[in-house]
Amino acid sequence: MAISEIVTDKSLLPVLTSSAETLAQCHQLLALLNPDAIPTEPARAHELSLEASKQQKVLFALLAQLRGQNRDAIFRVRDTKQATAEARQEIDRLHLQLQNLYYEQKHLTGEIAACESFDHKYRSLPLIPVEEFLDLHPEHRESNEHDLMLARINHEHAEREKLEQARQELLKRKQALIALNKKRREDLASLDQDLEKFIDAAKPIQKIFEKEY
């Protein structure tokens, strides 16, 4: 596989181009400096030396360019690593937040299920039938199930308060009657005592009458 197929980053393509040009320039310079190709004539050798010096300068320029591109690539790699690290931290933070939301959702789902299955006391309240309640309060015929249940509970509460008030009144009357009966029993007991005293006091008189007759 060619290097150009492996490296696809557009910022690195100029580095590949410069690297290829530098390599070609190295090969060209090495070809000029090949001992087997060096001419023996002084004039020709001098021309070859000048050409090699020229090609060497071009090579140095290409190497300087390649170093600069390499340095820029290293800086970009560092920036990319920093951006990647920051993105990874953000992903980790979002993942942790997602996990927390998942656990919170699971907890709330459990709480909702517990609430839905909770055997609340209002379910066992001896409320009057719905139709009977609606006959008494037709204004609730369009109410939803929740509002209708609240209205029925409030109605039951009001009715029980009335019954409690009636019970308290009856209890007061009962206590009053008990007190009255107690007073009458005490009066009767006192009357019995007075009657016994009267009978005891009348015994001498009774004896006198018995002697005369």
Image (cartoon, rainbow, N blue to C red):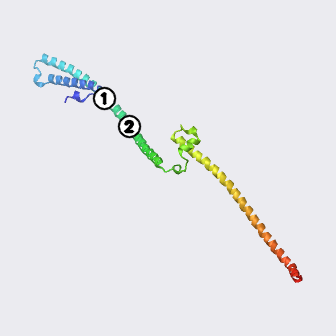
The residue most toward the right is 212
Q: What residue is pinned by disc 1?
A: 73
Q: Quadrant of residue 100?
A: top left
The residue most toward the bottom is 211
Q: From mark 2 to mark 1, how far is it between C-alphas? A: 26 Å
Q: Amino acid at mark 1?
A: Ala
Residues under numbered marks 2 and 1 in contact, where contact means CB atoms less than 8 Å apart:
no
Label 2, secondary structure: give it.
helix
Q: Quadrant of residue 171?
A: bottom right
Q: Nearer the viewer, residue 142 or 200?
A: 200
Q: Quadrant of the C terminus?
A: bottom right
Left or right placement of residue 118 versus residue 213 in this view = left
Residue 3 location (% of width, % of height):
22, 29
Q: What residue is pinned by disc 2?
A: 91
Q: Nearer the viewer, residue 44 or 175?
A: 175
Q: Earlier in the sequence, mark 2 or mark 1?
A: 1
Residue 160 location (% of width, % of height):
61, 50
Left or right placement of residue 193 versus residue 108 in this view = right
Tell me: residue 43, above or below residue 101.
Answer: above
Left or right placement of residue 43 versus residue 98 in this view = left
Tell me: residue 96, above or below residue 169.
Answer: above
Q: Quadrant of the N terminus?
A: top left
Q: Amino acid at mark 2?
A: Ile
At a point 72% along the width and 60% down the height, the residue shown is 177
Tell me: residue 192, above or below residue 208.
Answer: above
Residue 141 location (% of width, % of height):
54, 38
